[in-house]
Structure formats: C-alpha cells, structure tokens
Image: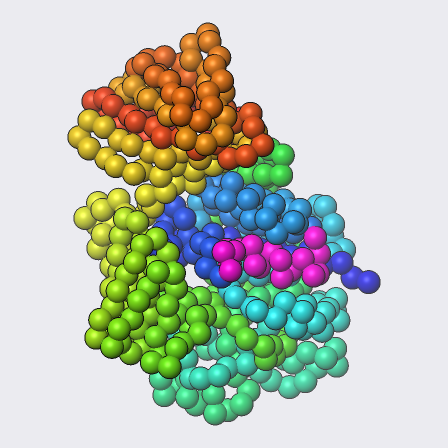
Amino acid sequence: MTNITPVILCGGSGTRLWPLSRKSFPKQFVPFIGNKSLLQLTLERVSLLSKNVICVASDEHRFLVADALQAANVQGTVLLEPVARNTAAAMAIAAIAMVAAKPEDLLLFCPSDHHIPDAAAFARVVQQGVAAAQAGAIVTFGITPTFPSTAYGYIRQGSARADGAFNVEGFTEKPAQHKAEALLLSGSALWNAGIFLCSAQTLLSALGQHAPDILQACQQAMASAAQDGNFVRPHVQAFEACRAESIDYAVMEHHANVAVLPFASAWSDVGSWNAVADLTPANPDGNRINGQGFALHANNTFVHAPHRPVVVLGTQDLLVIDTPDALLVAASSHVEQVKQVVARLDADNIAQSAQHRKVARPWGAYDSVDVGERHQVKRITVRPGAKLSLQMHHHRAEHWIVVKGTALVTKGDEQTLLTENQSTYIPLGIKHRLENPGKTDLELIEVQSGSYLGEDDIVRFEDTYGRTNS
C-alpha cells in the first residue's frame, strides 16, 4: 500500500476574518468549530491517512502549530519559513525534505484553514487519486460547486483518464459574475481548493521545468537548514532570496500532466465572515448566534460574542464580531472589504490590527487586562511543567499574585514556591524566572510599573524555547 504523507500549509495572515483572526494569531489557529481550530481539524482529518505529517509554518507561529499537533494526536515535522514566500516555496521545501527522507511516499498538500466536515469522504477521494499520482501526475481535488462564486478559482475538468482521474483543461482565476454563472452551467467546472497529491520528485521536476529559480533557492535554503527537535529552519538568506509565487501560477497553469478528481462533499475555505456565519445554523428569522448574542426584531444577522452579552435590535443583513479589544460591525454585502479595514488600521499604527489582547507564548499565554501610562496588568497562564526565560528588565518592576496553581519563582539567587493568594515583588534590574512545577495550569496576575513597559524590555539569559534576547 502506498504511504501518503500529508503536508499542511500553515501560512497566511487571515486578515479577512479580523478582528478574530490577526497577523499574530491567524484564522487557522482560532477555535472556530467545537472549540477546535481549523488547523487541528485539518490534522485530525488527514490522520485517517497518516499519523505522521509535515507542517510548513511561520517561525512566529511554531508553538501554535506544536500545540495543534499535540491536540490532534499526530506526530509532525515543522518546517519554519523565516519569511512568507507563498505556496510554491512552501511546497518545494516540503518536497525537498521528503526526497531526502522518504522518496517513495506520496505527498498530500492541504491548506490548514479549510473546513471539510466529512473526513472519511475526503480520505476516500484522496485514495482515488493514488494511481494517477503514482503514474507521475499532479492530482488536484476540485470541489463540486453549489453556486456561481466569484470568490473562488475554478478548475475546468476535461476527459477521463485510464487511471480513474480526469485531465485538467485549464484553470480560471476568480471570475466575474457572468463568467462564474457560465462555468457553473457548463457542468464541468470545479472550485479550486488548492489540495494536491503527487510524489516529491514529480513536484520538484515540475518546479525545475516551470520555476527553476524557486527550486534553486529552496534547495539552497534546505541544504543549510538547521534542526531543533521537530523544528527545521531553512537557511534565512537563501529562503529570503526566493521569489514569492503561488503554486497555481508557478506550476499548475503551465504543467501538462495535471489530473483532477471531483469532491462532492461539504467544503468551505472559511474565507470571509459570511462563510463563518454559514457554519452556524440559522433560526427562523435567519439569525445566526455564537456565544452570548441576543437578536431582537432582527433578520439575517450574525453575532459572534464569546466574551460578553451583545444585543442586536432591529438589524438586518448585518455581522457583529466582538472580541475583548476590538469590535467589527459590517453589512454582509461588505465583508470582502475587511482587508481594507485592517490595512487602514495598520497604516494608523493601531496595535489591534495585528495583535490580540491575549498573546500566545510557548509556555502558555498572557492577557493584557489594563494598560496605563506607567502601569500594566496582565493575567498570565503557564502550562504544567513550563517555564518562562531567565530574564531581567531595565525599566520596569513587577508584582506577581498567584490565583491558581503553584509557582516556582527564581529571584536573584533565591527560589521560592508560591501557592494561591501568595505574592512576590521583582525589583527593576533583578534576574528572575517563573516556572510551573505542578500538574495543572498556573494562573497569576502580574502588575508592571515603570517608565517603559514594552515587550522589548527583556534581557534573556537562558530560555528553554531557544528565543534570543528582545
């Protein structure tokens, strides 16, 4: 039986789903469905094919990927891109890694942020593509369209092949409405989901034929890659020199041997707030409510309110997305302009354009509860067995109050155990460290005070997670 290694492409900033998805915490990591992230659901889905995967992700998100792998109960190697270079480079470095490790395996390239509820149906259609992939084709999987979408690209399905798949006549990028309607009526057009099955050597040969500069840059980057446990870091300068281009433009639109298999099950790229709303069942008035939302005399209104009560009154065709530090209220007809909103906020240096109030860290997370001119209050959560770096601050002092669990505090040359309702003071300029020696989460309140409270006022002397000084 042919082994299939899934390759999960975890890049993308997800700005179309702001304010829930932001650069520091893109949509693939957001717990959208059943308190699971789209990445975790993707990993669980492909685990029906293999329990060993490759993830290609930003170095910034490496520990979010590691958490998702653990939650999905799969093993994985994580290739860390120092900069984003689109899907052609991401797929290339994965194929280069597999040629060296398991050249006989087929690679299944999947976006990390799509929702496919029927995992068994997905596994079956992938298996149907094995014969074509073994014969040297790049196999793509097209979604049977349900309406003339102008937001998706299309695959034009051609004649049947002897290996059970279909030839690809061509690709159509996001079409105008009349063109989308014509494609739907043709009966042979499929939505392009960006899912591919092929051998590593097939992909590398195609890149060598159609995008040799991308292949060469990626080969150079992987030749000097560094490995840290399950993390693999391509050479920074070599990878930065790579041209950024999608696999569709770099290879698929030019390659001769591309096959397609239709997939007629439910699928969503969760690419807009309308798509997110569609994942929630509607009530008789067409309202869709997540969390603590209330709709009165309203129609066709989506409310996402996980943190506090949000009431909509007399609204129609509206989307309301509430987070602890930013609120989006948008007409459902304008969701495609959310990226423009983020660009405007970014241009105005609004921190919420990219950062959440709650920030994930390899040891847990912190939530900035209150910020003033000379003080900041954070709620810090440290996972069992985890520890922060041994560090020092030049401009701030800190008070720590334990509210749950046990803290092992290093302060200068002293170590102290603190339990619930106990506290300690860290003066400015003192080396210190916080650890959780217990078996449950440690939660504490940190009160910072000083002339400068930025995250770059950290001098690290030792760090379990290999982070350098800020």
Quadrant housing residue 285: bottom left
Classify 26 as above or below 445.
below
Name the residue at 61% across, 52% down. Answer: 72
Apparent side of residue 321 relative to residue 209 in the rendered image (left or right): left
Find residue 65 and report its horizontal and vertical position in percent: 53, 46
Nearest to the observer: residue 335 or residue 470? 335
Residue at the top extreme? 413
Find residue 60 and report its horizontal and vertical position in percent: 45, 41
Find residue 224 and report its horizontal and vertical position in percent: 59, 36
For residue 86, say whether it is visible: no
- Provide the residue span drawn in magenta: 34-51
Name the residue at 70% across, 72% down. Answer: 124
Residue at the front extreme? 421
Nearest to the observer: residue 68 or residue 90? 68
Residue at the bottom extreme? 185
For residue 409, say whether it is visible: yes
Name the residue at 34% across, 17% down. Answer: 425
Classify 179 as above or below 5.
below
Find residue 453 and report its horizontal and vertical position in percent: 26, 27
Nearest to the observer: residue 210 or residue 415? 415
Figure quadrant of the N terminus: bottom right
Q: How is the image coloured?
A: rainbow
Figure quadrant of the C terminus: top left
Q: Is residue 44 magenta?
A: yes
Apparent side of residue 375 relative to residue 127 in the rendered image (left or right): left
Name the residue at 65% across, 49% down. Answer: 73
Q: Is residue 165 magenta?
A: no
